[in-house]
Image: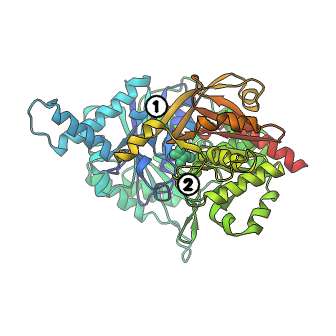
Amino acid sequence: MPKYIFVVGGVMSGVGKGAACATVGRILQGFGYKVTAIKIDPYINVDAGTMNPVEHGEVFVTDDGDETDQDIGNYERFLDIDITSINYMTTGRVYQTVIEKERNLEYGGRTVEVVPHVPEEVIRRIKAAQRRVKADFVMIEIGGTVGEYQNILFLEALRLLRTERPKDVLVAMVSYLPIPSKTGEMKTKPTQHAVRTLNSAGIQADLIVARSEKPLDGPRRRKLSVFCNISEDDVISAPDVNSIYEIPVNFDNERIGEKILKKFGMRPRRKDLKRWRRLVSTIRSCSREVRIGIVGKYFSTGDFTLSDVYLSVIEALKHAGWQRRVRPVLEWINAEELESSPAAVRALAGYDGLLIPGGFGTRGIEGKIKAVRQARERGIPYLGLCYGMQLAVVEFARHVAGLKDANTVEADPQTEHPVIHIMPHQESVIREKRYGGSMRLGAYPCVLAERTRSRKLYGSDRISERHRHRYEVNNAYRERLREAGLVIAGTSPDGLLVEIVELKDHPFFVATQFHPEFKSRPLRPHPLFAGFVGAALRRRRG
Ligand code: GLN
């Protein structure tokens, strides 16, 4: 019988519920069980694709083309599996299905009600995700915190599933224990309240993950046990860590996996966290550094710098660095600043590598083009991802191929030389305002040309990578760009879409229409990121 482990949040969000969920999954996987993970977001949005990245963070794209929450990315990285659309749920998506079913008379003329039909649809999806991969364990993270109106129907699904299969469902509450600076004492009261709130939804937590700045001590553990109806043993201490990859090691030291198995009356089939522990000791011992500049525009919210939007890019750079025992030091370069400050442009030469990630719209693009030019002319290793590839093509067209006003039509629809233009079938999509879920999305095959850097790095002539874009290289300019020296290193199998461009006689200049960052895993760094970080390291050493 498959087991379902729900992870809910107490007190406040943003304390690592997703990482805790991924971690428990990873530990159970290490015991020799098949694990999958589901994220539930309590938004009306059908997917994350239509949300402002500054508000919501990265849009993580799956192989089957879903635009999901960044937690799905964490699951893929921790569990080293490819997750598909059925594992991502939003309120909007669930309602959409229920309403469609009603329209199709699938409820056989009955009155369709919020309860039970909405929670039933949630449970149907959870079971479908389990069946798809025949998982022994399904981790289910419910977004937000208990006590919010928004996620009550998901808690209701939990309650119903637990009533149906009491022996197969566990609930872990990830809570936060603040340490007010005035008293310096760790407080359990907010967690006690959160547990009561969960109780009022008819649910008792089986485990409490006690997130805090510091490890949990004996008195606090006892308090939580007494006031939250839970044994002391079932409170997991989860202090802050430097890297999320340390969490499986910490949780394993608390024997969370063994505790869960025992509750289900199960035994480990084997135990394997060795490679993971080795990774953590590598991360802790990396002493060398490379300095990578990331040029983007989604960094600032008020007085704070936000890097969540580029989460997978950051992780991919780290994975590649750790493999070489170096720590990538990432610096955020505001593209708009490059437009007005020649000094900022000159300072780019100080980086060991420059990366331009995906992006949309007009703001900051001339700054990004300046950064590409510096990378190209000064031999700074460059990795361009999606928009970072399109703008590299624009820069090359303008300054090497002699197409002075070349541009992407995304920025200038009237440009004389539309070297990047909209994909033909996307025109009607935009005209009819069908924005949601309508980009070129998900995994597509790509063939790599011989004697290119990409081919060498991948060690293969056919790859599959994930996409999220509406624009593409305009084939009318392909020959002209090629004659000027641009290497078309990868295309779609029919040859019609340019997927990778490179420059010869440059230490490292690779730019992709796809997003390689989504497929990097901590123990399996992505070849292009590995090549890029390697080139940055060579530059550093001079
Ligand atoms: N804005 C570009 C496009 O839609 C690039 C998208 C991206 O970088 N993800 O094609």
Secondary structure of the residue carrying numbered label 1: loop
At label 2, counting other C-alpha atoms closer than 10 Å, the crowd grade (few under 14, some 14-19, many 20 or more) is some
Q: Position of residue 72 (x, y in %)?
A: 49, 41
Q: Position of residue 389 (x, y in %)?
A: 64, 44
Q: Which mark is residue 468?
A: none
Q: Furthest residue to the bottom?
A: 182
User: Which residue is found at the position 43% from the left and 57% from the top?
Assistant: 224
Residue that mark 1 sits on: 64
Left or right: 142, with 377 as reference point: left
Q: Position of residue 240 (x, y in %)?
A: 59, 56
Q: Nearer the viewer, mark 1 or mark 2?
A: 1
Q: Does residue 22 appear anywhere in the picture?
A: no
Residue placed most toward the observer, 245 or 44: 44
User: Which residue is found at the position 29% from the left and 35% from the top?
Assistant: 123
Amino acid identity at mark 2: Asp
Q: What's the CA distance linking mark 1 and mark 2?
A: 23 Å
Q: Position of residue 52 (x, y in %)?
A: 45, 56
Secondary structure of the residue carrying numbered label 2: helix
Residue placed most toward the observer, 215 or 73: 73
> Is 447 placed above or below 90 here?
above
Quadrant in which the N terminus appears: top left
Q: Quadrant of residue 294?
A: bottom right
Residue that mark 2 sits on: 308
Residue placed most toward the observer, 80 or 135: 80
